[in-house]
């Protein structure tokens, strides 16, 4: 059926009207997600047209359910990942999966060039890539070619980063890349310090994370020796240093440059749901919220918790749990359907095979801070943390029941083994009746992950993932433009209360340790992982970063990233809210 093309000015006007004059949200929608024809003319001037497109294609996997899916998307109750918003029903060759893990298959020139080829093809389709750089031998190791000695794993990280930057410079979505490193590689200190030199600005187009074992963390706290080793066909390289020296370098780097992030790798591995049958996790995606097997793929989507609050900012405010559970049910069915709708749109055959074998999906949440504010629960308080955990528990159980029902209808994921699946501590933490359902089969090897949500949370007008409200007003850098933005919930608050400024905790006023405890509480109900960043004031001492890392490890998080204000270029800059004095920060 032919679609009407809209002139840019008309589309801009319609989008601005839809978003109530919010230029940032309208820009993100039109620039990133609105469908265009082959001549570049806009076909979707508002999200309503996009929702109809998504519901129409989703119903191909669920006959007669187009109305249910339209309800799911409407009002931003559920927002699929950006690749789905852009690609489903699009004429362009783009993937519907936000993230992939691509291994460097061997420590050789052939292995490096193969990875570069596979990563470039994935970037070209709009997918983000994670890999483990520690597969490569350290600097000074013997090689059999004319070079005599290897330039080292960290030197090739710069090459991988450059590839991501070049692919991003060609227009469209940036080449998103995650490079992780083992805590036993001989170049461990060089990896940790890769981004601490502000003059050289190395590896600037990749995220860095350390896969830290419990043994390393324990050795660091006890100030014990730590052995680094790497074996090649020609030699075994071994070095010993103080684990505490490495730990101090890690804290210093995170304080100075916000990287590397920490992945608590033993927790990641032991709490995964399918550590068997070729699905054993080896690395993570770009933001760390999806641990995956080689060539693993994951399509993402987030429930907007704020969309389910009734009578906000009043004593009668409540969360419509029934509607949230219904949305969870249909969101699982939608993301599972995307596995099939996108099966022929993977950049690599190996990715297609891995996706169909695990049928991995990543259902998450956003707008958690908005939900708490609407209910009158201060973000970071014990009461708010308990309530948030209860909400995630409901989502978890509903999602697993939906996947079990899909398995009865369409069969479990091909690699499913009931006995092996039951060995996961996460599965054993489910209610007994749900564990019995899982034993009969699941449609998806893993179901839940909480992504940062970035652009899609701007689109929905809420906070990203489980983050606190960043600021009531702020400057936002997006698409080469700078927007003076106000958090959308502020307008709703004024309309509901007749004016004034709320006393909501924001990113730089929230207790960072309470923030970590919230993440740990929610991680108990997320079978994959949570990507989230703890914001810190510029004058935060290194000892606080160290304590936050240890708290996250001991409380059961799977990873942690900190961002100290001023440690690197910022996308958002907080401003005083309207009506507040710039100099004294008071009303």
Image (spheres, rainbow, N blue to C red):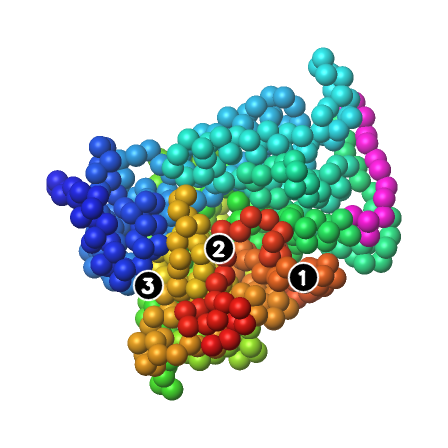
Instruction: Give me the residue at 35% from left, 36% from top.
Output: 94
Q: Nearer the viewer, residue 404 or 189?
A: 189
Q: Nearer the viewer, residue 245 or 343?
A: 245
Where residue 560 sits, quadrant-wise, is bottom right
Q: Is residue 242 magenta?
A: yes
Dot 1 alpha-carbon crowd within 10 angstroms: few under 14, some 14 to 19, many 20 or more: few
Q: Is residue 390 visible?
A: no
Q: Which residue is mark 2?
A: 572
The vertical placement of 507 against 281, above or below, is below
Instruction: Give me the residue at 73% from left, 45% from top.
Output: 183
**Which residues are the magenta region?**
233-246
Q: Which mark is residue 539?
A: 1
Taking 2 as reference, is 287 left or right? right
Residue furthest front as drawn: 583
Q: Which is more N-terminal, label 1 or label 2?
A: 1
Secondary structure at badge 1 equals: loop
Q: Which mark is residue 473?
A: none
Task: For marks 2 and 3, give the CA distance.
Answer: 25 Å
Q: Is residue 428 magenta?
A: no
Instruction: Give me the residue at 61% from left, 71% from top.
Output: 511
Q: Which residue is mark 3?
A: 77
Secondary structure at badge 3 equals: loop
Task: For marks 2 and 1, give the CA distance.
Answer: 18 Å
Dot 2 alpha-carbon crowd within 10 angstroms: few under 14, some 14 to 19, many 20 or more: some
Q: Nearer the viewer, residue 176 or 142?
A: 176
Q: Which is more N-terminal, label 3 or label 2?
A: 3
The vertical placement of 261 against 348, above or below, is below
């Amino acid at each position: 059926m032919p679609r009407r093309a809209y002139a840019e000015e008309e589309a801009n006007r319609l989008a601005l009207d839809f978003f109530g004059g919010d230029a940032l949200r309208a820009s993100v929608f039109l620039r990133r997600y609105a469908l265009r024809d082959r001549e570049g003319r806009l076909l979707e001037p508002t999200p309503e047209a996009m929702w109809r497109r998504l519901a129409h294609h989703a119903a191909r996997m669920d006959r007669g359910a187009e109305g249910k899916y339209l309800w799911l998307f409407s009002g931003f109750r559920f927002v699929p990942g950006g690749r789905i918003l852009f690609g489903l029903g699009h004429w362009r060759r783009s993937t519907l999966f936000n993230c992939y893990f691509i291994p460097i298959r061997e420590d050789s020139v052939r292995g490096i060039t193969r990875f570069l080829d596979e990563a470039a093809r994935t970037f070209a389709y709009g997918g983000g890539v994670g890999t483990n750089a520690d597969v490569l031998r350290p600097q000074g190791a013997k090689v059999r070619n004319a070079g005599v000695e290897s330039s080292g794993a960290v030197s090739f990280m710069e090459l991988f980063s450059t590839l991501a930057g070049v692919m991003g410079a060609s227009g469209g979505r940036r080449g998103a890349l995650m490079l992780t490193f083992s805590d036993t590689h001989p170049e461990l200190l060089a990896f940790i310090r890769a981004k601490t030199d502000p003059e050289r600005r190395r590896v600037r187009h990749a995220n860095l994370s350390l896969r830290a074992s419990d043994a390393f963390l324990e050795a660091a706290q006890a100030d014990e020796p730590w052995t680094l080793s790497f074996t090649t066909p020609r030699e075994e390289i071994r070095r010993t240093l103080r684990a505490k020296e490495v730990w101090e370098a890690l804290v210093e780097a995170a304080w100075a440059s916000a990287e590397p992030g920490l992945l608590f790798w033993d927790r990641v591995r032991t709490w995964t749901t399918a550590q068997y049958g070729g699905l054993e996790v080896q690395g993570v995606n770009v933001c760390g919220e999806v641990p995956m097997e080689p060539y693993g793929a994951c399509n993402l989507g987030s429930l907007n918790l704020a969309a389910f609050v009734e009578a906000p900012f009043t004593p009668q405010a409540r969360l419509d749990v029934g509607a949230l559970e219904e949305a969870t049910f249909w969101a699982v069915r939608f993301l599972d359907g995307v596995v099939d709708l996108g099966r022929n749109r993977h950049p690599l055959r190996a990715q297609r095979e891995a996706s169909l074998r695990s049928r991995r999906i990543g259902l998450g949440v956003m707008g958690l801070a908005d939900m708490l504010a609407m209910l009158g629960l201060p973000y970071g308080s014990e009461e708010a943390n308990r309530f948030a955990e209860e909400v995630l528990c409901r989502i978890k159980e509903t999602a697993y029941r939906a996947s079990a029902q899909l398995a009865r209808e369409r069969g479990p994921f091909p690699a499913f083994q009931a006995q092996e699946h039951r060995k996961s501590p996460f599965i054993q933490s489910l209610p007994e009746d749900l564990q019995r359902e899982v034993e009969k089969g699941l449609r998806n090897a893993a179901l839940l992950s909480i992504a940062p949500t970035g652009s899609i949370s701007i689109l929905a007008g809420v906070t990203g993932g489980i983050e606190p409200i960043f600021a009531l007003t702020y400057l936002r850098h997006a698409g080469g433009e700078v927007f003076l933005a106000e958090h959308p919930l502020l307008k709703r608050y004024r309309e509901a209360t007749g004016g004034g400024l709320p006393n909501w905790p924001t990113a730089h006023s929230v207790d960072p340790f309470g923030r970590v405890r919230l993440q740990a509480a929610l991680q108990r109900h997320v079978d994959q992982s949570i990507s989230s960043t703890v914001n810190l004031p510029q004058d935060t001492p290194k000892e606080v970063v160290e304590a936050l890392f240890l708290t996250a490890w001991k409380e059961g998080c799977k990873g942690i990233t900190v961002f100290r204000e001023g440690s690197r270029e910022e996308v958002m800059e907080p401003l005083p809210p309207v009506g507040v004095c710039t100099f004294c920060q008071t009303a």
